[in-house]
């Protein structure tokens, strides 16, 4: 995924009200930007961090600039969750998600019950694959983690995937790790133990969990490789789905 327009550098001052951040531009002007991430963004929001911004041409936007990525420890971290699904879709279309392979159609935002929707329905012949995508920005000691805050909605998505698997469909959850400083993935049991337990149960019942890492730069974001998944309740065993 290449950025159509050049991103603009700035320095983070603070992130607040979940969807807003104040940044200092190179000319030292302070501006408020949209922060498209509902998570806690744990470990990313220290004042003084370098950031990259995109600019919208929409004259109706109150905050025309959008926070796209933050540099932490020398690595860019993609925080714009609005880009995650298009990024994964691009990877699927290019055949980079080998566990999915080539599909005939990709349908986004699929209603699976009166309670929730999932990100994609993939079809290959008579086969249906339900896929939920999660953006991962948290990493500790070389391990990427999700979630970075308690997520009741995320747990509900896992339960939906379990139900779909029981109904005879293929069901997958893909964690898109938008930072380079991680070699493995694990659910963040210390943050949301219920989510971690539900993910382990989902895997036991046949839901396929995948973690793919993206190369993030101010020029482009591209999914490049699969990461091993370690389930915390079975630390000695990796998820080899």
Image: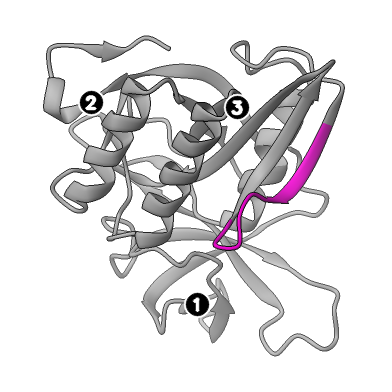
User: Which disc number belongs to residue 164?
Assistant: none
Percent x, y of residue 62: 70, 90
Distance between the alpha carbons at the discs numbered 3 and 1: 25 Å
| Relative side of 213 to 200, left or right | right
**Res 103 seen here:** yes
User: Which disc number belongs to residue 223?
Assistant: 3
Q: At numbered mark 1, what does the secondary structure look like: helix, strand or loop?
A: loop
Q: Residue at x 80, y 54 (%)?
A: 5
Q: Residue at x 71, y 79 (%)?
A: 64
Question: For mark 1, does the 10 Å Cα neighbourhood hold few (<14), some (14 to 19), or many (20 or more) residues?
Answer: some
**Res 177 seen here:** no
Q: Is residue 83 above or below residue 122?
A: below
Identify the magenta region: 106-116
Q: Is residue 115 above or below residue 25?
A: above
Residue annotated with mark 2: 231
Q: Quadrant of the C terminus?
A: top left
**Which comes sooner in the sequence, label 2 or label 1?**
1
Question: For mark 2, does the 10 Å Cα neighbourhood hold few (<14), some (14 to 19), or many (20 or more) residues?
Answer: many
| Relative side of 202 to 162, left or right | left
Residue annotated with mark 1: 19
Is label 3 or label 2 in front?
Answer: 2
Q: At numbered mark 2, what does the secondary structure look like: helix, strand or loop?
A: loop
Q: Is residue 169 above or below residue 85?
A: above
Q: Residue at x 61, y 25 (%)?
A: 169
The answer to whether the residues at label 3 and label 2 have Cβ atoms under 8 Å apart is no
| Relative side of 73 to 136, left or right | left
């Amino acid at each position: 995924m290449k950025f159509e327009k050049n991103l603009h550098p700035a320095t983070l001052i603070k992130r607040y009200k979940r969807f807003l951040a104040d940044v200092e531009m190179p000319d030292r002007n302070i501006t408020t930007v949209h922060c498209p991430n509902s998570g806690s963004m744990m470990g990313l929001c220290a004042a003084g961090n370098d950031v990259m911004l995109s600019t919208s041409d929409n004259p109706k936007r109150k905050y025309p600039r959008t926070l796209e990525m933050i540099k932490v420890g020398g690595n860019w971290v993609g925080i714009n969750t609005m880009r995650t699904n298009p990024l994964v879709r691009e990877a699927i279309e290019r055949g980079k998600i080998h566990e999915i392979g080539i599909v005939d159609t990709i349908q986004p935002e699929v209603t699976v019950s009166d309670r929730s929707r999932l990100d994609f329905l993939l079809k290959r012949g008579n086969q249906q694959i339900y896929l939920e995508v999660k953006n991962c920005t948290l990493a500790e000691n070389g391990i990427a983690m999700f979630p970075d805050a308690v997520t009741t909605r995320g747990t509900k998505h896992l339960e939906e995937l379990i139900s779909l698997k029981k109904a005879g469909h293929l069901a997958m959850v893909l964690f898109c790790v938008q930072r380079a400083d991680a070699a493995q993935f694990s659910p963040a049991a210390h943050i949301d133990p219920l989510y971690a337990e539900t993910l382990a149960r989902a895997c036991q019942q046949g839901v396929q969990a995948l973690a793919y890492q993206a190369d993030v730069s101010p020029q482009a974001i591209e999914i490049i490789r699969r990461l091993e998944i370690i389930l915390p309740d079975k630390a000695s065993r990796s998820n080899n789905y």
